[in-house]
Image (cartoon, rainbow, N blue to C red):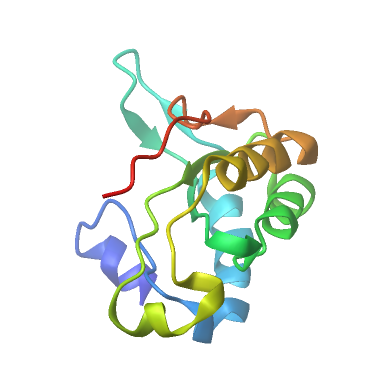
Amino acid sequence: MMIKLAERGRHNINFVTPTHVVPQIIEAIKEMHGQVGDLVVNENGVAVRGLVVRHLVMPNRVAGTGEIMEFLAKEISSNTYVNVMDQYRPCGTANEHELISRRLNPQEFKYAVDAAKRAGLTRLDPRDRPRLILRF
């Protein structure tokens, strides 16, 4: 399906709530990196080729961030460009599940960024730095 999307001119492929296809995603990541390599940007900072991984951090470490960062650094490339995202918002029935019924706190986001660095990943999105998270 991803190859067909690329043939139709799609520039990127995003997976949302992909838990049911994790084994296939893991395989697709090693294959993608093998085909396109690490992220390459042009003189204007625009991505022209390569793998970018966007990881949504979840409360209470339920996303396995530490393990994912280790996998990326060791099995894919320590030069993998990673966007560590703090945008999680509980929606739908998430409020019924204690572990994911709230937004992240600053310490959880800092843990995620630090986990990426500990794993040896050095190409983190510049916005991936701990910051104050406002709750309304």
- Does residue 75 appear to the left or right of 33 in the view shown? right
Image position of 132 (left or right of 136)? right
Extreme front residue here? 136
Q: Position of residue 21 (x, y in %)?
A: 52, 83
Nearer the observer, 27 or 85:
85
Residue at position x 58%, y 77% from top? 22
**Residue 135 in sight here:** yes
| Left or right of 91 on screen, residue 24 | right
Which quarter of the picture shows residue 81?
A: top right
Q: Residue furthest top?
A: 43
Does residue 78 appear anywhere in the picture? no
Q: Quadrant of residue 41?
A: top left
Q: Is residue 126 above or below residue 15?
A: above
The total number of labels drawn is 0
Q: Residue at x 71, y 33 (%)?
A: 117
Residue at the spot x=56%, y=38% of the render?
Answer: 38
Residue 135 image position (x, y, % from top left): 33, 47
Q: Is residue 115 above or below residue 93?
A: above
Placement of 126 over or under 98, stated as above or below: above
For residue 13, above or below residue 79: below
Q: In the picture, which quadrant includes the N terminus?
A: bottom left
Residue 35 in the image: state x and y as whole percent.
54, 52
- Front one among 52 and 103: 103
